[in-house]
Amino acid sequence: MPARSRAVRGPVAGLGPAVAVARFAAVAAFGLAPALPGCGSSAAERSVRRAAASHGVRTAAPEAGPGRLGRRHRGTPRLLALVTDPAGNRLLVVSVPGIRLLRAVAVPGEPEYVAGTSAGGPIAVVSARSAAVRLLGGPQLLGVRVPGRLVAPHVTALAPGGDFLYVTDDGSGRADVIGLARQRIVSRRFVGLGAHHLAFSPTGGQVWVVLGQSAQTVAILSTTTPPPSGVTGGNWVNPARPRVVAHLDPGYRAHDIKFTPDGRSVWITSASGPTIGVFDARTHRLRRRISGGAPPQHVVFSGAFAYVTSGYGSTIEQISWRTGRVLRRVRAPYGSFELDAAGPYVVTSSLLRGTVAVYDRDLRLLHVRRVAATAEDVALVSP
């Protein structure tokens, strides 16, 4: 979407199998321009999404019935894709690579962004219209709403270590920190109005937050603290207490953001142009520009590669994140803004066609299928 939150893949500390939830957060659009319908939730954009029902390829037949995710599926899928369908007020559970619809879970309030850990672990879903974050879990994917007033929650990301979930709130300009063990907001930090996409460094010591869907400013937060008195060694990381330490003007309108796997660089995609800026994580200086297709682009890293979608350009690219060289560029269903990658697969979801497309790591298309009127966000988890 002209989005993303990215998928939570590690274990979530403090939540046992008996706990029926884990978390997701976000989206009511803040100042969204019509040129970025994939990330917004305006009435006009919702009409466009619902009208998209007439497009796409074959509709997958759901397999109803209780039980754990994928229980009634013949054979074991290699991965599961969690897909939000805001027009249908549902969270879809889809097998990968075969794209069979296994479960459809009712989630009120037009759910847009999702993050999950595993088939038996917690899932976080953000509902735009109801301004709520819900944690879903257990065999029946029962959920609870995280308490606390939210204005326009949007994007969520799990802090390294798995104990805390961050939610950006466009309307209040806050980054809200949710303690998963307590299932409640444990701290709130004002980072700037329009707070939207965010990314953690691999160690969790830095958090970069883009202040808008078409933003001029990126807020840089630190979660490091000096060790207790008498303790030797470097600074400690405390995700529960972030603080703003700097601001960055990337020199163009920013949209999505991700740290490279080595933590040395930050990729900031464009909401206004065809290139992506690669910034030094320490000095904040621009290192290079990379071709990314029609804006806005979204990016995810897997192994030695970055994968970049252009929903309006109907493309997905494979890029060497170390050299910046574009290795492959292939067609993708129109409106495929969001993506995720895990294991041997890369998956996109099309907001405007309602499709899920599965590629291998070299971007050979394996399967594509229409699963709903709208398919906003996608997160890959292990069965």
Image: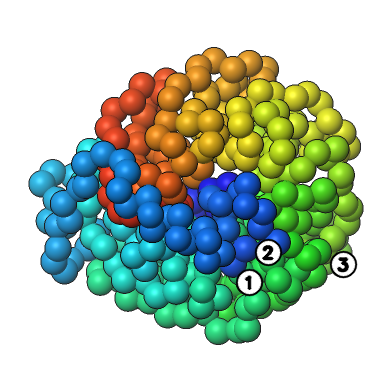
Q: From this viewpoint, is residue 198 visible?
A: no
Camera-near label (3 vs 2) is: 2
The image position of residue 206, as x and y in percent, is: 75, 51
Structural crowding at the residue carrying mark 1, measured as other residues with C-alpha within 10 Å and reported as few (<14), some (14–19) or many (≥20): many
Q: Which residue is mark 1?
A: 152
Camera-near label (1 vs 3) is: 1
Mark number displayed over residue 229: 3
Q: CA distance from mark 1 to mark 3?
A: 40 Å
Compared with 254, 333 (above or below) is above
Of labels 3 and 2, earlier in sequence is 2
Kindly identify the residue that appears in the image at 75 percent across and 31 percent down: 278
The image position of residue 163, as x and y in percent, is: 57, 65
Q: Are marks 2 and 1 in contact (CB under 8 Å)?
A: yes
Of labels 1 and 3, earlier in sequence is 1
Compared with 246, 342 (above or below) is above
Q: CA distance from mark 3 to mark 2?
A: 43 Å
Q: Which residue is mark 2?
A: 30
